[in-house]
Image (cartoon, coloured by chain):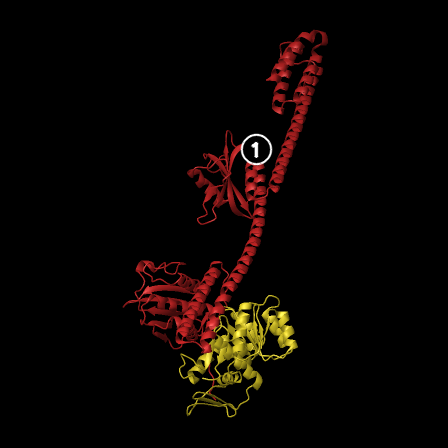
């Protein structure tokens, strides 16, 4: 595990948390050092603080992505929505906002590692509580009832299932579902998300499946 | 006068020497005298002297004596020549003198203007330009000078510049105001308000008035030369003044940009230095709790540390938000959002602080989307909910509702607490305002941030008391059009 943070305190904290959960940790306090370390040893994942003194965290991420699909979780400040989005669009796997909850960080890390090991989801069915999505038959059922869906709704749902547990930015979703020329149609996305929740959530006003990532995008919960 | 005495003297001498030279030479002496006099006196007096001497010569010297008729042809010829020569010479010398005088005046004028321009160009700032202008105008026009300049704030009333040499009385100021608005001179020596104490001249840059020059004369009003000088002075002063002002404004902008950059750097570093330790505390306690190795007491203590650090983090966040709002560095990133989504996220984030209150949400069906900055909106709703939770007794419900009304989306957070005293309602959104009956806790920042955040997003806020007790805080944001989607289901 590679921890990249310029703050010794956060670095120590991350090391303690990760080591107590059985990960081996290497630390870097600057971008150049991080890139060197990442090239020297094989790491399973990296935790990257976006605010670094030498190279910006985004730059480190871009350079890493030039040659490796190493799962990267970025650490961001509370109101850094713009940098979160940019990091995700540059290929970060997930983000955690400081002050982070260690349980949340570990969960995100485990999910990222799982996705990295498994490769893209290719299971024929997705199950979440009462909800079953049969990707082969393009059928969505809730309990015993079939849920009727429009083509766009289904495309959106399939995208989420492919990236279950991973946060998707608005732009990523718009590009995948509506195509690259419709990246500004935020209103569509909002309306369709409301519809998906209406049709698939047990309690649409308190969603458990389609979670809103404030100012960034949406994440589909992988397990209830 | 001197000329008259000179002519009398010459006449007396002529009378004495006539018997030796003869009367015709006398005419030549007169001619000589008149031509010499023409060097000093103007056309009119020369004509007068010519006529007088000619008549006298004719009457006294020319034969027949003591009579006006001339019999000799030669004498007649002499008289005519005398007139023609003196009048021509008189005319020429007068013309020459006038030309020299006007040239001299032009030169004076030009040199005055040059000196003024040079003086003003050397001035380092606007104040110095004013001071030097006052000094120069006083020197050239010999009057007390005042600059009347409009104020910086409405109603932009004209006030005398500090270094002015006099200040017009109230009645005179109204003349100055007229001059300022009409952009033409008035007061003594002009066509308007001739009985005024001073003369008021507009300062005008690019056809827009920028001030008024007021002159108070000790004795007489302006001579035409002074007036024309003033006519040239004033645009020159305005020009230099405007140039200096532009230069100052540019400098000021540079300074502002620099101070803004500094402020941002400071804010960022303070924000980083405050947040990092709090983040470490919060994260460490969460790890401790999750480790499962704590006794019940330790678990409780850890929970206390955790909630304290969360609270501290919120305070830091509020302070930074307030600082950003105050410094005008908040640039909202407006996107379309679903109100119910927003409320739900906000409630989830503050759930730890509001657990003592039952939450009720009522969101109207088909509520339009709003154009807002999600982070700001989330903090706004969170602030309102935490505010309600802090100021109301435990177990009283907090109601969050949203509906559309007159093209706006109205988001309300209502409680069943003691409400807000009526006289406090207007000021409750002010920075650091705390209601006198407020319970301890809270920074006085929360509602000010709510107002600031909503206003930068183009909305407005209001507070009221509810019928049946409690307060309600409302947010109004412009509604957007929800796209109509029609699509067949699979």
Question: Is residue B373 shown to the viewer in this render?
Answer: no
Q: Is residue B202 above or below residue A176?
A: above
Q: Is residue B483 above or below residue B310?
A: below
Percent position of residue A71, x then y: 58, 79
* Horizontal side, residue B318 vs residue B440: left or right: right
Q: Is residue B107 above or below residue B235?
A: above
| Residue A7, quarter of picture | bottom right
- Residue extending furthest toward the left: B468
Label 1 marks which chain's residue? Answer: B
Percent position of residue B302, x then y: 42, 72
Total of numbered circles in the picture? 1
Which residue is tagged 1? B139
| Residue B378, quarter of picture | bottom left
Residue in the image at 59% along x and 70% along y: A57
Q: Nearer the viewer, residue A42 or B121?
A: A42
| Chain identifier, colour red | B
Of helix, strand and loop, which one carries label 1? helix
Percent position of residue B480, x then y: 45, 71
Specify few, some or many for label 1: CA neighbours under 10 Å numbering under 14, 14-19, or 20 or more: few
Percent position of residue A209, x then y: 45, 82
Q: Can you say which quadrant of the picture contains the N terminus of chain B? A: top right
| Chain identifier, colour yellow | A
Question: Is residue B100 shown to the viewer in this render?
Answer: yes
Q: Nearer the viewer, residue B321 or B376?
A: B321
């Amino acid at each position: 595990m590679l921890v990249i943070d310029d703050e010794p305190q956060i670095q120590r904290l991350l090391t303690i948390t990760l080591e107590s959960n059985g990960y081996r940790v290497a630390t870097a306090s600057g971008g150049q050092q991080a890139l060197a370390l990442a090239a020297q040893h094989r790491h399973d994942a990296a935790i990257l603080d976006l605010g670094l003194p030498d190279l910006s965290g985004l730059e480190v991420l871009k350079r890493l992505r030039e040659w490796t699909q190493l799962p990267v979780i970025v650490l961001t400040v509370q109101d850094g929505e713009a940098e979160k989005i940019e990091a995700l669009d540059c290929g970060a796997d997930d983000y955690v906002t400081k002050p982070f909850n260690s349980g949340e960080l570990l969960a995100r890390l485990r999910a990222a590692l799982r996705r990295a090991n498994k490769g893209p989801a290719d299971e024929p069915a997705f199950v979440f509580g009462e909800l079953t999505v049969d990707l082969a038959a393009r059928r969505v059922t809730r309990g015993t009832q079939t849920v009727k869906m429009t083509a766009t709704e289904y495309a959106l749902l399939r995208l989420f299932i492919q990236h279950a547990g991973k946060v998707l930015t608005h732009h990523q979703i718009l590009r995948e579902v509506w195509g690259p020329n419709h990246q500004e149609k935020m209103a569509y996305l909002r309306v369709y998300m409301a519809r998906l929740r209406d049709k698939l959530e047990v309690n649409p006003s308190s969603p458990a499946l389609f979670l809103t990532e404030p100012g960034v995008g949406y994440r589909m919960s992988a397990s209830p | 006068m001197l000329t008259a005495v000179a002519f009398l003297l010459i006449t007396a001498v002529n009378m004495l020497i006539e018997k030796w030279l003869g009367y015709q030479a006398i005419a030549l002496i007169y001619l000589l005298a008149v031509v010499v006099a023409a060097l000093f006196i103007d056309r009119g007096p020369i004509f007068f002297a010519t006529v007088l001497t000619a008549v006298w010569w004719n009457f006294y010297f020319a034969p027949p004596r003591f009579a006006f008729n001339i019999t000799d042809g030669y004498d007649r010829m002499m008289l005519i020549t005398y007139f023609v020569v003196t009048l021509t010479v008189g005319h020429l010398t007068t013309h020459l003198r006038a030309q020299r005088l006007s040239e001299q005046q032009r030169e004076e004028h030009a040199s005055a203007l040059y000196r003024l321009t040079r003086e003003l160009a050397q001035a380092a700032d606007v104040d110095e330009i004013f001071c030097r202008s006052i000094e120069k105008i006083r020197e050239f026009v010999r009057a007390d000078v005042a600059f009347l300049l409009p104020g910086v704030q409405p109603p932009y009333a004209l006030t005398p510049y500090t270094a002015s040499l006099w200040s017009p009385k109230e009645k005179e100021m109204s003349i100055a105001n007229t001059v300022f608005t009409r952009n033409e001179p008035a007061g003594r020596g002009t066509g308007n308000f001739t009985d005024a104490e001073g003369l008021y001249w507009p300062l005008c840059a690019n056809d827009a008035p920028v001030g008024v020059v007021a002159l108070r004369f000790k004795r007489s009003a302006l001579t035409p030369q002074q007036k024309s000088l003033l006519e040239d002075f004033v645009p020159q002063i305005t020009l230099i003044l405007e140039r200096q002002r532009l230069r100052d404004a540019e400098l000021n902008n540079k300074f502002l940009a620099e101070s803004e950059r500094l402020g941002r750097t400071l804010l960022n570093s303070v924000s980083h230095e405050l947040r990092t330790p709090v983040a470490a505390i919060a994260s460490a306690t969460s790890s401790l709790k999750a480790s499962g190795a704590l006794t019940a007491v330790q678990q409780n203590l850890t929970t206390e540390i955790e909630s304290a650090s969360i609270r501290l983090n919120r305070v830091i966040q509020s302070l930074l938000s307030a600082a950003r709002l105050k410094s005008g560095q908040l640039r909202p990133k407006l996107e379309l959002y679903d109100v119910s989504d927003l409320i739900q996220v906000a409630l989830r984030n503050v759930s730890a602080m509001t657990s003592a209150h039952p939450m009720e949400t009522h969101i109207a069906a088909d509520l339009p989307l709003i154009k807002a900055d999600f982070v700001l909106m989330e903090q706004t709703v969170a602030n309102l909910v935490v505010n309600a939770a802090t100021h109301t007794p435990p177990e009283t419900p907090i109601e969050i509702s949203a509906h559309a009304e007159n093209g706006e989306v109205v988001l309300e957070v209502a409680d069943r607490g003691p409400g807000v005293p009526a006289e406090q309602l207007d000021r409750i959104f002010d920075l650091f305002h705390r209601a006198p009956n407020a319970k301890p806790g809270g920074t006085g920042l929360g509602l000010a941030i709510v107002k600031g955040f909503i206003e930068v997003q183009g909305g407005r806020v209001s507070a009221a008391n509810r019928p049946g007790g409690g307060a309600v805080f409302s947010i109004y944001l412009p509604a957007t059009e929800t796209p109509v989607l029609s699509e067949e289901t699979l």
